[in-house]
Image (cartoon, rainbow, N blue to C red):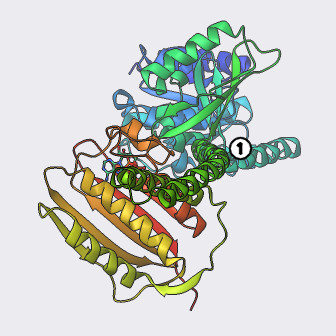
Amino acid sequence: MKKKILVVDDNPVMLKFMINLLNREGHDVKTAEDGFIALSMLTSFKPDIMFIDLIMPKLDGRKLCQIVRKMEDLKNCYVVVISAAVLELNLDCIEIGANVCIAKGPFDVLKKNVLAAVKESYHAPRDTIPKSIMGLEAVDPRRMTSELLSRNRHLETMLESMAEGILEIFSHRIVYANSAAVSLFGLPEEKLLFSYPFDLFEKNECSRIKALLKSGEGGPFEIGHDTPLKLKDRRVTIRYLPVKGDGSTVIILITDVTERKLLELQVQHARKMEAIGTIASGVAHNFRNILNAIHVNNQLIQMNSDSNAEVDTNTGRIESAVKKGAQLVEDLMQFSRKELIKEFKRFNLSELIRETHQLIKISFDKNIDIHINVPESISIIGRPSELSQALMNLCTNARDAMPNGGVLRIEAKVDENNVIVMISDTGQGMEKEVKEKCFDPFFTTKAIGKGTGLGLSTTYGIVKDHEGDIHVYSEPNKGAVFELHLPLAPE
Ligand SMILES: Nc1ncnc2c1ncn2[C@@H]1O[C@H](COP(=O)(O)OP(=O)(O)OP(=O)(O)O)[C@@H](O)[C@H]1O
Ligand SMILES: [Mg+2]
């Protein structure tokens, strides 16, 4: 019976031998010089039998088998692996997905085995397990091949253990992907192979890469250094390295920079806060001197006014404005942490939270439902007065976010060596831009005279001073959660 056969081998002598042999038997034979060409042919030609050489440039026989085995329209194709290196490779036909393996040896032995394999393909159920390698008796192991293959395995181990994703591209398609690349793309290897690498990125990113490639005149170059490329939930940079002297092959290195970018942002934020702190403390210092001068002169006027009621009212107003100004200076100093270092002491944070709760219970509007849930005792080391101020700031913000009432929750729990205090509300929440800026000094969305924008920046300063962290989670109309992480006192 006439069969459609595809022979894939990079050796022209071997191809000629196979064509002659199989044509004589009346079969329809096509040939391909490597796995890459074979795959292109397989889109239109569906063979009944494939003879595949194992070691080939570009896409090798092992990968080709792997891909063919996943192709639905080739699931009945009988795959015969023929290799000159079966002995040296210590070949496992089952693992590759072949139906039969034949060792390349003298042509007369080979001829017998090839014809036997074709015959076998008529009867064999598709999932036959190969018994043994045919033709082994006629070949001897070769030292040179063993050494080359062993060297190859060393290099492959290195490539597979690298943290960077590596792709080898031939004629714009992927012919090799290491495991890091496979996991970055989140696709099985056989899906990655033979696909166009840049089409695996989102549409916008794909056009961005292609535009850069066009302007880059062949490379090598890096893409995404300043603005990393999005790949699933990761941020990556790409190095595009054409192989010298080979116009069609390119190596692409993919580096996952997600964590690095996050750290950079944190450092940037910390630096910004520090710079603002320095300016704030300078301003506060001068402002305090000015306030002092006003305060002293105001007192002089009071002393000399001979109980003039009108003057007293005016100086009283000045005095109260000076007090407010002094509080502002105090806040600024707090934020910039340039104030005299007050002593840290061990105390029960739960108690402090309960005190704050008492205070807000009497002062907040009744349309705000306040819930508290804290353990009996949480021992931390710090400055109670500052932490109490931080809690008050957060609770006040929560109240302001719920002008029509809502629920305010104050919770605390111990997690390993930290205590996490959560202040959450069911208020208006924050847009992304507000969330990003809310810790900046003087940032406020409140009306003039309603807020100074120092509440959260002061809180930030206090928490950092306690070697803690503050996080905010919020979305518009979905309320806000502020989380303080503070280290527990050692036992
Ligand atoms: N719980 C919250 N819900 C919604 N938005 C909030 C919340 N907490 C803070 N914000 C936003 O962050 C901004 C900055 O808060 P911050 O406490 O620093 O200043 P403020 O409350 O405006 O003024 P101040 O606290 O100095 O009186 C607020 O103006 C508000 O837009
Ligand atoms: Mg506030």
**Residue indicated by mark 1:** 159
Residue 194: x and y in percent read 53, 25
Task: Please state which of residues 449 and 204 is positioned toward the viewer in this rendering.
Answer: 449
- The residue positioned 21% from the left and 64% from the top of the image is 364
- The residue positioned 42% from the left and 46% from the top of the image is 452
Which residue is outermost to the front?
306
Q: Is residue 243 above or below residue 180?
A: above
Q: Is residue 345 above or below residue 82?
A: below
- The residue positioned 55% from the left and 57% from the top of the image is 300
Q: Is residue 354 visible?
A: yes
For badge 1, the amino acid type reads Leu
Q: Is residue 115 above or below residue 279?
A: above
Task: Please state which of residues 484 and 456 is positioned toward the viewer in this rendering.
Answer: 456
Task: Please state which of residues 263 and 409 is positioned toward the viewer in this rendering.
Answer: 409
In the rendered image, the quadrant that contains the N terminus is top left
Residue 459: x and y in percent read 48, 60
